[in-house]
Image: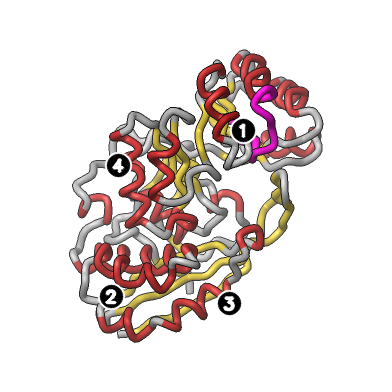
Amino acid sequence: MKLNFYSYNLELKNTFTISHASRDFQPTLIVALSDGEYTGYGEAAATSYYGVSVERMQADIQKIEPLILENIDLEPEELWELTQPHLKGNPFALCALDIAMHDLHGKRNKLPLYELWGLELKDYPLTNYTIGIDSVEKMIQKIKEFPWPLYKIKLGTEDDLGLIRELRKHTDAVFRVDANAAWTATQAIANAKVLKDLNVEFLEQPLKANDWAGMEKVYKESVLPVIADESCIEESDVEKCAGYFHGVNIKLTKCGGLTPGKRMILKAKSLGLKTMVGCMTESTVGISAIAQLLPLLDYVDMDGGLLIKNDIADGVKVYDEKVHFPNRNGTGVELYQ
């Protein structure tokens, strides 16, 4: 029984900017959980915006290492319930551990994780490719460098509509717009009318996470569907979003891993909400975990491996406008040596 940690600084292909930050590198932590025969890998990307560092994640997991190793033979969901009270202040660390346990569980049972869950790889969505905020010229260049049928455009600029109009001149691809909580309700409703004619599919988190009165108005009056992101962090948030959003974007790192993430998806479906899972610019380790949920999703944002120069693992890959699953068990991940 062994618990190992690997930290990496993933180099981004382009400076990535959203409404509150820019970065050229993405620090990430890999958790490797071994039972003596098989090793499961999990990942969580660090983010200063949420006060989460690689060092803090590793330290928090190491504090409960005896508890983890003593219970390594449990089901992943059972281990999650045991460790969550100790890591509830650090869902990113909990996520990395939970993904590692799920990968290990699949390998032990000699099945890909999605098969272990009784899911089939059919009729699942293609990931969008994210274009971060930049000059119009550089955003156009990014689109030309990576032709793709579906882009997520990060907004929160001084002229969001003008930016989308310019980008639209250079591609017929479907756009999704992520305002990162930068708009007011009035702006969102007005912008939606223009954006719908520019082949925008939906708006993601147009308002601040706690502006429920504004979101109720947007939900009722927007001509485009609205998807929650920052308003849907943990399991209890899903039910809150019904009647305020048309769907939810679940981040495994923010909710604490595959165990709560899968429950959130099923809860959203039961409420008639569209389901989406998003990434935090993880490597193929984290992306391969997200991919196991694809048959349950309406939308997905799993382009982390496409955005980095130095991927660290083999596993589920996205290319040629398709998702390619390896012939391996668990999440299908193997770290590059």
Of discs 2 and 4, which sits in the foreground? 4
Helix, strand or loop at disc 3?
helix
Q: Quadrant of residue 331?
A: bottom left
Q: Residues within 10 Å of mark 4 (few under 14, many from 20)?
A: some
Q: Quadrant of residue 50?
A: bottom right
Which coloring applies here?
secondary structure
- Three-letter amino acid code at the position of disc 4: Leu
User: Disc 3 or 1, which lies upstream in sequence?
Assistant: 3
Q: How many marks?
A: 4
Residue at numbered disc 2: 38
- Three-letter amino acid code at the position of disc 1: Pro
Q: Which mark is residue 49?
A: none
In front here: 237 or 123?
A: 237
Residue at numbered disc 1: 206
Residue that appears at 52% across and 28% down = 226
Q: Residue lying furthest front in this view? A: 213
- The answer to whether one can see residue 149 in this image is no
Residue at numbered disc 4: 266
- Three-letter amino acid code at the position of disc 2: Tyr
Real-space CA distance between mark 1 and mark 4, rounded to the nearest whole angstrom: 24 Å
Real-space CA distance between mark 4 and mark 3, rounded to the nearest whole angstrom: 33 Å
The stretch of residues the image draws in magenta is: 176-187
Q: Are marks 1 and 2 in contact (CB under 8 Å)?
A: no
Real-space CA distance between mark 2 and mark 4, rounded to the nearest whole angstrom: 29 Å
Tell me the quarter of the image containing the N terminus.
Answer: bottom left
In front here: 60 or 138?
A: 60
Real-space CA distance between mark 3 and mark 2, rounded to the nearest whole angstrom: 25 Å
- Three-letter amino acid code at the position of disc 3: Glu
Real-space CA distance between mark 3 and mark 1, rounded to the nearest whole angstrom: 32 Å
Verify whether residue 178 appears in magenta: yes
Residue at numbered disc 3: 55
